[in-house]
Image (cartoon, rainbow, N blue to C red):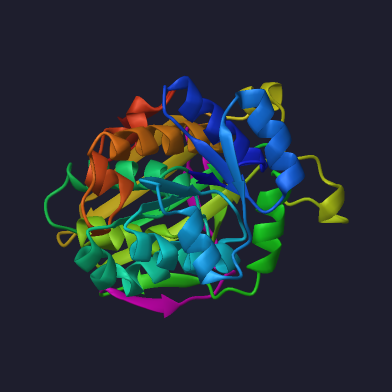
Amino acid sequence: MIYGATGYTGAMIARHAQEAGLTIIIAGRDREKLAAMASELKVAFRAFSLNDPDTIDGALEDIDVLINCAGPFMHTARPLMSAAIRQKVHYLDVAAELDSYQLAEIFDDAAVAAGVMLLPGCGGSVAMLGCLAAHAAGEIKNPVRISLALHVTGAMSRGSAVSASENLSTECLLRRSGQLMQRESTELQNFDFGKGPQACFPVTLPDVITIWKATAIPDIETFVYVSGDGFPQGDLADLPDGPTAQEREASRYQAVAEVENADGDTLRMLLDTVNGYSFTALAAAEAGRRVLAGEYLPGFQTPAALFGKQFAETIADTRITLSDNSR
């Protein structure tokens, strides 16, 4: 099941999943939109809100894997994750918000007991940066610190803009000695994505949770550099669903990982990939395919740890390389 399938990213995931030969059921709250999409794709649909646990349980009764694409995830992750555990359904999502990951930590024991996997961030920056971090950590002995910067380019989808606007008050966090701590959001740091240093601002990406879980590196910082259109202004409801295929093709994403060991040795690795929306949709569909094929572990998992550090490089045109100025 793909919940939130009529949204910008959800619709792309549904089409990629169908192209991969998966049997899908599209779902969400808007019956009219779902019926039109189901007719176009020739698939079944289920319309239900997330207000009543019994309704959600009934909708998931015969489902094996759920991909939640309905943001803001601060509203949808808890009811769907809870129902997935009750109904023994593997839960995946494409959240860029911290809520899903903190909930997955809280629900880890219950998911293990139920034999259910929780895989928030099956696509997007968590899959990208997790694989990049795993590559970098594997190239240096005893890594103790890692900084990650994501270059976000091109236009935002309406759903991403709404989710971001509702999370603007979220604390800016980093991890020190294994503990999450608040930091100043004004402390810029330079990263080179391949065309010279760019000043990046610190943000709380979910990787402060997922990379700690996957690598146990105790010090983790995450940054973003935004080029292109930046954050949209005005009434977000008036925005288009998201960038066109041509706009996505013209706006590739990059990321940098800088990892340091106890001796002060530093290593840098670069990731270059397709537009983030394209990557997210392809990666989420592929993750769903793999889980349906039996590739899963109970409890809270991360894409890089579950599928291996090469996972990102199996998605479209994605490359991870050692930086020219790495030392």
Which of these two is toward me, 46 or 156? 46
Residue 243, image x, y percentages = 71, 33
- Describe residue 312's horizontal placement relative to residue 261 as left or right: right
Q: Name the residue located 87 percent from the left edge and 56 percent from the top edge.
A: 235
Residue 191, image x, y percentages = 47, 47
- The range drawn in magenta is 178-197
- Describe residue 214's horizontal placement relative to residue 153 as left or right: left
Look at the image and say whether residue 222 sits in the magenta stretch. no
Look at the image and say whether residue 194 sits in the magenta stretch. yes
In the picture shown, does residue 43 fall above or below 207? above
Which of these two is toward me, 249 or 321? 249
Q: Name the residue located 25 percent from the left edge and 40 percent from the top edge.
A: 307
Q: Name the residue located 11 percent from the left edge and 51 percent from the top edge.
A: 141
- Describe residue 210's horizontal placement relative to residue 38 as left or right: left
In the picture shown, does residue 226 fall above or below 23? below
Which of these two is toward me, 42 or 129? 42
Q: Quadrant of the C terminus?
A: top left
Quarter assignment of residue 212: bottom left
In this orientation, does residue 71 appear?
yes
Q: Name the residue located 40 percent from the left edge and 47 percent from the top edge.
A: 63
Which of these two is toward me, 309 or 40? 40
In this orientation, does residue 98 appear?
no
